């Protein structure tokens, strides 16, 4: 991956409305190649909303987001697997859409052993592993992961941490939310739900 | 990506045939209800049968498909492909096309049910089948359009989506005409309307999805 000094992901005075009021207000940050940002905050603080807004999946109230066209990998709460298909058929489906998992990541997450299983029979953690293999793609410059460690066992979580560390060191920009784990060297963006009638939350970036 | 969408649609629809059975069940109940209402006037029921059946099939088809598309558009897969895939609209087109292909046997079965239920001649079955097969393209595209509209507009979209359903009315009107007397000209006219509607709704769906 070519290293550049210009930001791969920029949020400029980003505000997002949910319900009656603003859930996120005036958030600004940017991620350079090799940057990782860990989004933390209590339930309802707006972590998932932030990632959805950054991915362009929900409208923003004001401000702007700049990210590379076609260069974003996104994993939300939903694993995005078709339950009526097997794991290998799901992978074929994604491959047909130009999304092929990195064999190294796939192998590290133990996806190969799940290939013939119907997606419907996977445990939550197994489904998460497949979804992660379909998200952690080397050709994407920005990775947005919402609770990537959720449901993973200790060993797999450590493998994922190692994969993320490696890819960040190779120059991707990573933004992820997690209650369970952080990443060495990652900055922290703390979202605070104020529980006011307007539901306003403020964000602060810590290094 | 068109072929990926097409393949997915064929696979999932064929594996979840229960949904089609549910729609057929609804159709059977609706037909029975009409039959019971007009039961004491069989002389009125018989001639009206194919027309009532046509309207029932079209509305059942639109309703079942609009719900299917709504689920699909709101799914995690769709969310991820919107962000990550290179040609997301191509994927949607593939799925709409697949949905149309899979609907064809279902529609033929529904036409056969109506013919049987109202003791109609073979010519009525042929007219129903021809009309349904022709209009299926436009109706499938209409369903994806309605679903995309509902996703775009959130809660309000439920009402606007329902308001969009009358867009199926041209097919009801044309289909009734076709059942009354099938001619090559009426088939060709209906085919033209169906193709035109399919193109308009597919392009509109793509545009709406780019706004979501």
Image (spheres, coloured by chain):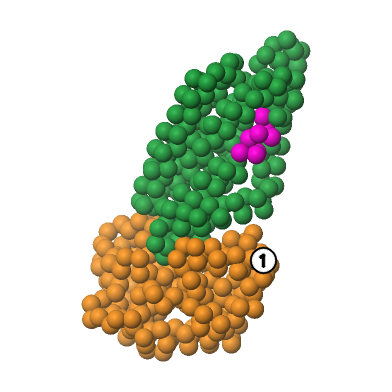
The C terminus of chain A: image quadrant: bottom left
- Residue B8 on the magenta span: no
Please name the color used to draw chain A.
orange
Task: Pick out the residue farthest to the front.
Answer: B184
Q: Nearer the viewer, residue A155 or B205?
A: B205
Q: Nearer the viewer, residue A80 or A107?
A: A107
Q: Nearer the viewer, residue B168 or B137?
A: B137
Q: Locate residue A17: give its quadrant.
A: bottom left
The image position of residue A114, as x and y in percent, is 64, 75
Give me the chain letter of mark 1. A
Residue A48 visible, this orientation: no
Q: Locate residue B109: give its quadrant.
A: top right
Assess disc 1: are there few (<14), some (14-19) or many (≥20) residues with their C-alpha within 10 Å of its C-alpha. Answer: some
Please name the color used to draw chain B.
green
Q: Is residue B127 above or below residue A125?
A: above
Q: Name the residue located 70 percent from the left edge and 29 percent from the top edge.
A: B112
Q: Nearer the viewer, residue A59 or B188?
A: B188
The image position of residue A205, as x and y in percent, is 32, 79
Q: Name the residue located 58 percent from the left edge and 15 percent from the top edge.
A: B181
The residue to which callout 1 is attached is: A118
The magenta-colored residue range is B104-111
């Amino acid at each position: 991956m070519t290293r550049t000094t210009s930001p791969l992901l920029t949020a400029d005075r980003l505000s997002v409305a949910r319900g009656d009021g603003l859930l996120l207000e005036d958030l600004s940050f940017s991620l350079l190649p090799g940057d990782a940002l860990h989004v933390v905050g209590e339930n309802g603080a707006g972590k998932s909303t932030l990632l959805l807004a950054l991915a362009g999946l929900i409208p923003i109230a004001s401000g702007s987001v700049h990210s590379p066209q076609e260069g974003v990998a996104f994993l939300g709460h939903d694993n995005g697997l078709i339950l009526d298909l097997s794991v290998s058929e799901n992978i074929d489906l994604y491959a047909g859409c130009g999304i092929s998992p990195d064999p190294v990541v796939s192998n590290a997450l133990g996806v190969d052993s799940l290939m013939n299983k119907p997606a419907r029979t996977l445990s939550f953690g197994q489904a998460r592993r497949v979804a992660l293999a379909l998200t952690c793609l080397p050709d994407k410059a920005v990775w947005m992961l919402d609770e990537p460690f959720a449901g993973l066992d200790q060993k797999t979580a450590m493998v994922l941490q190692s994969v993320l560390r490696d890819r960040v060191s190779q120059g991707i920009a990573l933004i992820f939310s997690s209650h369970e784990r952080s990443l060495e060297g990652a900055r922290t963006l703390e979202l605070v739900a104020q529980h006011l009638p307007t539901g306003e939350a403020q964000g602060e970036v810590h290094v | 990506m068109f072929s990926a969408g097409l393949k997915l649609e064929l696979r999932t629809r064929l594996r979840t045939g229960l949904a089609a059975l549910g729609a057929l069940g609804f159709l059977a109940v609706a037909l029975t209800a009409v039959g019971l209402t007009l039961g004491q006037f069989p002389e009125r029921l018989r001639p009206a049968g194919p027309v009532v059946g046509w309207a029932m099939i079209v509305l059942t088809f639109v309703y079942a498909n609009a719900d299917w598309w709504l689920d699909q558009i709101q799914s995690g897969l769709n969310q991820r492909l919107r962000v990550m895939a290179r040609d997301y609209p191509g994927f949607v087109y593939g799925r709409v096309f697949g949905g149309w292909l899979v609907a064809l046997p279902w529609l033929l079965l529904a036409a056969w049910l109506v013919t049987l239920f109202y003791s109609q001649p073979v010519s009525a079955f042929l007219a129903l089948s021809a009309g349904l097969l022709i209009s299926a393209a436009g109706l499938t595209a209409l369903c994806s359009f309605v679903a995309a509209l509902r996703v775009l507009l959130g809660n309000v979209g439920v009402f606007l989506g329902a308001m969009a359903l009358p867009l199926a009315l041209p097919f009801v009107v044309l289909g009734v005409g076709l059942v009354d007397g099938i001619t090559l000209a009426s088939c060709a006219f209906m085919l033209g309307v169906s193709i035109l509607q399919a193109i308009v709704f597919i392009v509109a769906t793509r545009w709406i999805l780019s706004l979501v």
